[in-house]
Amino acid sequence: MTSKIFKSILSVAIAVLLSSLVIIIGVLYPYFSDVQESQLKDELSLAASATEQLGESYLEGLDHNRYRLTWVDADGTVLFDSHADAAAMENHADREEIKEALVSGSGSSTRQSSTLTEQTIYEAARLNDGSVLRISVSRATALVLVLGMLQPIAIVLIIAIALSAWLAHRMAKKVVEPLNKLNLEKPMENEAYEELSPLLHRIHAQHSEIKSQIRALKRKQDEFDQITGNMKEGLVLLDSMGRIISINPAARTLFGAGIACVGEDFLTINRKQNMRLALEEARTQGHADFRAKENGREYQFDLSRIASDGNHHGMVILAFDVTEQVNAEKHRQEFTANVSHELKTPLQSIIGSAELMENGIVKEEDVPRFVGHIRKEASRLVFLIDDIIRLSELDEGTEMPHEDVSLKVLSEEVCETLADAAKLKDVSLEVTGDDGVVNGVRRLLYEVVYNLCDNAIKYNNPGGSVKVTVAQKPGEVLLSVQDTGIGISPEHQDKVFERFYRVDKSHSKQSGGTGLGLSIVKHAVKYHHGKISLESELNKGTTISVLFDTRA
């Protein structure tokens, strides 16, 4: 802006200077020309009077440096010329000023020289004897005058330009300085030019509108960040070029990317073939989905194109962790298969024994043994069904009545119930420790203690022992069941809580186990927000501990 003001002022100054020179020359030149012509007429009048009285002698006595005098007879013959030989001069009857003087008594004309640099002014007057006296003088044209003044004009022009430039610079600086000091953040507090007031009011109104829009955008951005930040699903927004616009924490964790990845191409954080193909499919078809493993977990990826008026504007990538669903489906299928198998085995045994008895194949003395076998398999079937029902209840998360339960008292009840079974295995039972009050479902807590103690007896050695310990600490109760049994090898320790999993299937069948006891323990403890741990060594025994948080 300063440059424009400077150039404008300087251009105006130069234009005014040149215009002034043109006007001055255009006015003064005609003025001085008129003055010269008037003087020339006066000179002619004096010379004419003197010539009429004194004749040629007067003309010869004059100083002819400034003027040229020519005396012409009425027929155009030159009688005298102050600058040339009159006898050698051509007839002047055709000269404009001569002809005019012969007719009207006086005449005048101006003739341009061949070089256009000089003009000759002629004034003629008729004398009493009919002859004509002519006076002439040469003068420079306006062009010559200008050319002659080039040097002073140039000097004046340079001085004027320099002065104009200096003044223009100062003026531009003074004009722009208040504009440069404008506080556009607070436009209404400025005391600049009054002409800027409408502009400052508009800027103030725009500032207010922009601030309002920024606040609204920030509020929406905060809402968006809070929503996406708390999402368990990964969310990535891409622009039309595939660059990351937004990526929530879950997606950054999934793809191992930092917050600095915003603005980068998405393929820089995930170059896998299935993702590239899905991006291309979503871009062309509008949607794509696939499943893949990331960081040891199963994810469902849904990609949707963002389009408007037929134009592609970006992409939305959603990543759902479906590991639990996949595992649940897998477990459901395995559970269904296992249940079918486990139910089928005792039923087949019962049906087989019943058919033998029905067809009279069984001897009379063997009937009690077959009946006992049927009763045993039927009992096993009932136990299995009861365990399945308990697991179903725990899986559904059905709300059950809670009460304060003493784990020590509960453990003593369990040991009393299992006393006969322990006696048959020659295993001693012992309950020690604190009262250990836990607020929970009494029936489920009983199942926990019962199954742990039942397993400790079943898989113990003759002459072994089972020790139940309850430890009360601030905010928690620890229940541990320790046996001196056969132990569990390390490769089986992580799987013993799975449904129908048996370390030794032959031993389990002999002991009458269903394979669901520890799975019921695991789910019952989880229902009470507890933690379960296992320590075991082959042929030395096993200790299973359950920690309950009484503050929950």
Image (cartoon, grey):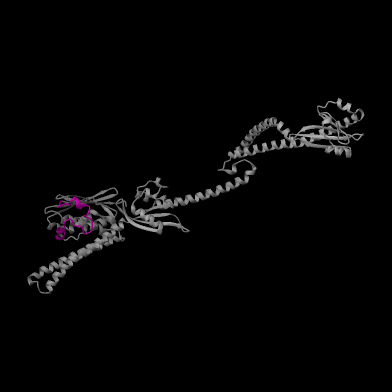
How far from the left and from the top, in percent, is residue 253? 35, 49
Left/right of residue 149 with respect to residue 48 in the rendered view: left
Relative to 192, say whether 460 is above or below.
below
Report the front residue among 229 and 105.
Answer: 105
Relative to 30, say whether 523 is above or below.
below
Does the magenta run of residues contain 267? no
| Image quadrant occupied by the N terminus | top right
Quadrant of res 24: top right
Does the magenta run of residues contain 505? yes
Quadrant of res 527: bottom left
Report the front residue among 16 and 345.
Answer: 16
- Hey, which residue is sitting farthest front in the picture? 88
How far from the left and from the top, in percent, is residue 136? 82, 32
Q: Magenta stretch?
A: 484-510
| Number of numbered callouts drawn | 0
Magenta highlight: main SS: loop
Left/right of residue 139 with respect to residue 529 in the rendered view: right
How far from the left and from the top, in percent, is residue 448? 23, 56
Report the front residue among 454 and 259.
Answer: 259
